Image (tube, helix red, strand yellow):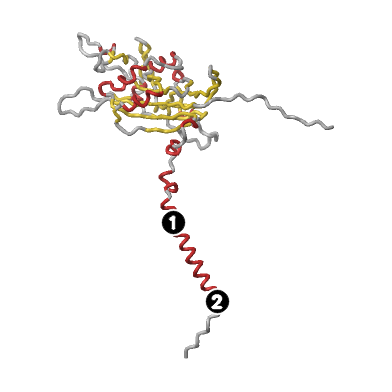
Amino acid sequence: MRKPMRPVSKRNARLTRMSACFAMMFIAGVSACSSSESKNPSRDPLALETNIEAGLMPSNAQRGLELRVLTVDDSENRVARYLSAYEQSIGSMNSEDVLRWRAWGLRLVVVPIDKLETILSNQDHTQAAQVRWMGEFPQWRPIIRTGEIFNNTVRVQDGDAAHYQTLVGRPRLLSRVWTVPEVTEDGLKARLHMDLAIQMTRPQRSNRWGEIKLPTALDEGDLIEELRISPVFDSNAALILVGEDPLVSWSLTNGDGALSDPGEEGTSIGPRTPQIRTLGQQMLSTPGTGYVAPGIRYVPPKKVLIVLVPKADGQYRLLGPTTTSKGTGS
């Protein structure tokens, strides 16, 4: 025999209705949160990239270094045709530093900042350009790493004389950057101090029982001391690094883009023997296949352009000495 159901009291009924309302509010809240998160692009992990965030900052609020890396087709000497006008312009750089880097096949070209975009846009890119905001960093930091040197020997061309050095490892470009003041006719201006160096990295061996210390970039290989420089830039010029044979002059001999190369003059005994390539050539260029017979695939010569764009806007302000005023008792 079924027991009669007990009537629900008013209090229990009110609690039941309140529980149902809270459950509906919780479900609605969760749905609303999920919907708002899916519609808010700022919560998308793919949007949280440093270079995009840095690029949104106003340029006049930045001080530091912008790095661009371009891999381009150098057929018909395209790179030289657009950079030859600035080959002799070194800006504030030391001429001895420029010549020393050139001897190693690393050609430094200072380009006015208002000409930079025109020069780069006229290059034939073989892959997407890489752009990264580096800012200021007072500690040595690797910014470019290139392929390993397999034949170990590089040519250093000092004028007509050449000597050879044996290098082991993978070369990379190191830098450190910070803002410095400079007194000018217009007052105290901000300038960007850049230390640049080439390092030969070597495989690192872990030492479980060695001294425990924080590793630095300089621990990974020796610097080539000849290739350590410290130029100072303002925001009016950019520095482009190109791998090029020191014997090649970018002085165009005619309108078709031909270059003056003393080493390519013909002789009665035929073409000259190819020379050992310089460090800069091995780091930042490939010669391609040259002229090939019909039916053989042609591979164009390529160059990598390292573009360093300094940002040093703004002024310094001299502050006088501060004093602490002390009240005197009456």
- Whether residue 188 is situated above or below residue 326 in the rendered picture: above
Residues under numbered marks 2 and 1 in contact, where contact means CB atoms less than 8 Å apart? no
Q: Secondary structure at mark 2?
A: helix
Residue type, label 2:
Asn
- Residue 316 visible in the shown view: yes
Residue type, label 1:
Ser
Q: Which residue is mark 2?
A: 12
> Foreground residue, 227 or 309?
309
The residue under the point 23% across, 25% down is 289
- Residue 149 visible in the shown view: no
Where the C terminus falls, by quadrant?
top right
Which quadrant of the structure image shows residue 119? top left
Residue 4: image location, x then y, percent: 50, 87
Q: Secondary structure at mark 1?
A: helix
Residue 114: image location, x then y, percent: 39, 24
Crowd around label 2: few <14 · some 14–19 · many ≥20 (10 Å): few
Which quadrant of the structure image shows residue 106? top left
User: Mark 2 or mark 1: which comes first in sequence?
Assistant: 2
In the picture provided, is 8 more to the left or to the right than 132? right
Q: Which residue is mark 1?
A: 34
> Foreground residue, 43 or 147?
43
Which quadrant of the structure image shows residue 180? top right
